[in-house]
Image (cartoon, rainbow, N blue to C red):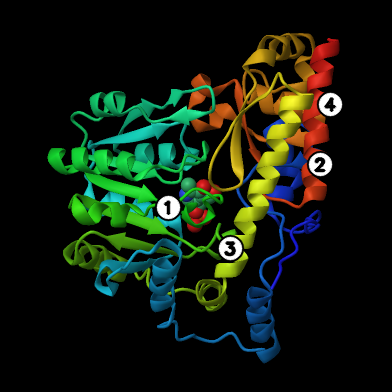
Amino acid sequence: MSHDFSHSVDRAGSRAEKWDRGNIAGICGNADALPFWVADMDLPVSDGIRQALEDEARLGVIGYRNSSALKPAFISFMKERHDTVLDEDHVAFAQGMLHAIALAMNIFTKEGDRILLPYPSYHPFIDMIEDNGRVIVPYHMKRTAEGFTLDPDEWKAAGEGCQAILFCSPHNPTGIVFTDSELESILTLARDRGQLVLCDEIHSDLALPGFRHIPMVKANERIGADVITFAAASKSFNIAGEHCAFACFSSKEMKERYEKVEKRLHLTGPGYSVASMAEMAYLHGLEYNRQLCRHLERNQNRLEEFLRTRCPELKLCKGHASFIVFIDCSAIWDKVVQDRQKNPQLYDGDHFVLSHFFGQRGGICMNDGTWFGGDEYRCYVRFNFGCGEDLLEKGLEGLEKAVRFIRES
Ligand SMILES: Cc1ncc(COP(=O)(O)O)c(C=O)c1O
């Protein structure tokens, strides 16, 4: 069956966070800007997921649901999609990715522990470590001509004395798909240093064609570090609002320790619709997911080509997974600052300067680079190309309009 991703779903006026005019104004100063920020996609879900939700509505009763088929469905998907065999005794259900990581961080590390975090970083990781009284040890990835990369020697030096690592693979926002040997050296070092590896793999099923995501648990089979990976159907099948995840532990003891706390806090069991969607996705969504990856590859290629030919001032930091990408705007930064000085009413002081620039001058809303680690990333924006070709073209027009403004200023 072929899935049509050419047109975006019109979510304007819905309750989508992404399209909320107040949110958009807060990020880029222009409530009417088109949203290319938060990481969900303006694309239709599979017919199977839609059908599962319609069946529930038709039944007319949302009672307690038997969700015992969900974990086996996830495990069989991991085998099929990633050739990774998971032991059910090592896998726990969790209500959302961030919730699961925060819980694991609380159980397996203690206040004051030092946690190595690669930057640029998905902002909630920064909050999570700080809010839980742990200490961030930053590692800023190396900028290359194409994008970002993890330098093994710098990584090794940065991680000395850390008790844990909070990793993201594939990486948000750079889209890096880590190779087997990169994962092996991270894991070997962690094992030798007795560091716990917490690895968010929410973007794992969206490696673009030609790239292979290797689950950390699989890479760890021959190494034996203490690892917890977190996976979800949410990005892979465009059901980000479902809030359902799985935590996979390198040992049964760790899983039991985690589940004991989940039980104590009564955090067990997915909601009715959540389980229906996730089950449907894992059991019948593989082809949808594959076609989605091909669509995302086309969109990123289109973005790359557009920037190269029409806006060479903007440099794409090309990723190999998912639908988010960093754009390096260093070449226009000085002029953007001049625009802010001349027109302070369009900006919010020093806050989110580039996202205000693109919001005000191009009518598009993107995440400001500073959201991913402060001033070091002020010359970047994160663009979300998880949409149909129609909306993507409008985003490209917005980028060009903003760049033209700079050229003419
Ligand atoms: C790397 C990463 N982790 C976690 C999340 C959020 O997951 P959840 O909504 O299931 O907590 C996102 C959402 O964008 C993400 O990109």
Q: What residue type is labelled 3?
A: Asn
Give the Cα distance between marks 1 and 4. 35 Å
Residue 132 visible in rendering: no
> Quick check: marks 2 and 4 in contact, CB under 8 Å?
no
Quarter of the image that includes the C terminus: top right
| Neighbourhood count class around disc 4 (C-alpha, 10 Å): few under 14, some 14–19, many 20 upward | some
Please state which of the two labelled residues, at mark 2 or mark 4, is closer to the viewer: 2
- Looking at the image, residue 236 lies above or below residue 171: below
Q: In this view, does 228 lie to the left or right of 147?
A: left
Which residue is denoted by mark 4 in the rendering?
401
Which residue is denoted by mark 2 in the rendering?
393
Decide which of tag 1 and tag 4 comes sooner along the chain.
Answer: 1
Give the Cα distance between marks 2 and 4. 12 Å
Decide which of tag 2 and tag 1 comes sooner along the chain.
Answer: 1
| Neighbourhood count class around disc 2 (C-alpha, 10 Å): few under 14, some 14–19, many 20 upward | some
Q: Which amino acid does label 2 sit on?
A: Glu
Secondary structure at numbered mark 1:
loop
Q: In this view, does 73 lie to the left or right of 356?
A: left
> Quick check: marks 1 and 4 in contact, CB under 8 Å?
no
| Neighbourhood count class around disc 3 (C-alpha, 10 Å): few under 14, some 14–19, many 20 upward | many
